[in-house]
């Protein structure tokens, strides 16, 4: 917000305003409830980081067995085989489908691990500060939130194969125990990212600027 005749920018808090996080309507500071959508108004979500860390830990706990247990169980007349996420990607690569194997590894390993690291970094930066600007951290958060949904590709593949490859006693494909824990891990990390109050980046940035000044 910019006041006419003044080159300095004001934040909503400095102007005595609070924004509804659901519908983006602006209200005077002190208003408890948004008259448009009924959401509770608060200038800062002080419990944001606690929820971020709780959901982050839950996602990490689920991600460990998701990589240790089978994602896919294939039963035929002669044998039964089980494949983990990485093991399945390796088997696909052995058959020459390197592109598909790369997609699975990126979506199921690289992206989830990157999300864990990014969310942890952003949460720590709010408490301890960072050399990275608040604007860059906000962009990092937006990227993490956007790509989070694509981590579900393994679960979608398993669901599709389970529905299509059911040839009675000849062959059948079933989801392994890792499919559930992997889906829970993705859900928890998505909720962890959504629980983040990005305004805390700018508050930390302002406090550091005042300290240096």
Image (tube, grey):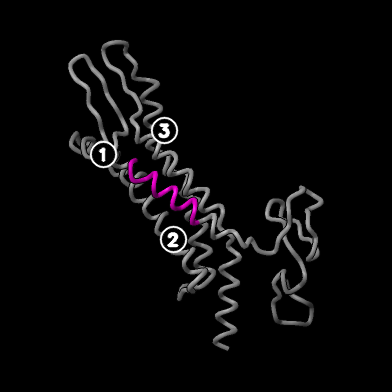
> How many numbered marks appear?
3
Magenta region includes residue 61: yes
In this rendering, position of residue 160 left or right of residue 72? right
**Lower sequence index among marks 3 and 1:** 1
Task: Pick the quarter of the image with the N terminus.
Answer: bottom right
Residue 196 position by quadrant: bottom right
Q: Where residue 82 sits: x, y (%)?
A: 25, 29
Q: Residue drawn at (17%, 16%), measured in percent from left and top?
A: 78
In this rendering, position of residue 124 left or right of residue 77? right
Q: Where residue 73 sits: x, y (%)?
A: 29, 26
Would you name the residue on which mark 2 appears?
Answer: 120
Secondary-structure class at tag 3: helix
How far is disc 3 from disc 1 in space, using C-alphas? 15 Å
Q: Residue drawn at (48%, 73%), measured in percent from left and top?
A: 128
* 164 versus 13 height, above or below: above
* 66 versus 54 height, above or below: above
Q: Which residues are magenta?
A: 53-66
Within 10 Å of disc 1 (Cα), the crowding (few <14, some 14-19, many 20+) is many
Would you name the residue on which mark 3 appears?
Answer: 156
Task: Pick the quarter of the image with the C terminus.
Answer: bottom right
Would you name the residue on which mark 1 appears?
Answer: 89
Q: Where residue 33 sits: x, y (%)?
A: 78, 54
């Amino acid at each position: 917000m910019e006041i006419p005749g003044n080159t300095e920018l004001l934040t909503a808090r400095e102007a005595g305003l609070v924004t509804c996080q659901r519908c983006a309507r602006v209200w005077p500071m002190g208003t408890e409830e948004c008259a448009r959508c009924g959401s509770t108004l608060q200038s800062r979500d002080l419990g944001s980081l606690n929820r971020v860390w709780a959901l982050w830990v839950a996602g990490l706990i689920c991600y460990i067995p998701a990589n240790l247990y089978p994602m896919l169980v294939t039963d035929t007349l002669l044998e039964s085989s089980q494949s983990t996420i990485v093991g399945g990607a390796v088997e696909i690569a052995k058959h020459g489908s390197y592109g598909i194997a790369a997609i699975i590894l990126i979506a199921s390993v690289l992206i989830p691990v990157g999300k864990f690291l990014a969310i942890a970094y952003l949460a720590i930066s709010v408490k301890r500060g960072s050399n990275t600007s608040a604007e860059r951290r906000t962009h990092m958060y937006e990227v993490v939130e956007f790509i989070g949904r694509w981590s579900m590709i393994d679960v979608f593949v398993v669901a599709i194969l389970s529905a299509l490859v059911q040839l009675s006693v000849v062959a059948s494909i079933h989801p392994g125990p890792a499919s559930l824990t992997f889906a829970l891990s993705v859900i928890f990390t998505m909720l962890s990212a959504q629980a983040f109050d990005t305004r805390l980046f700018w508050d930390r940035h302002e406090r550091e600027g005042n300290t240096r000044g």
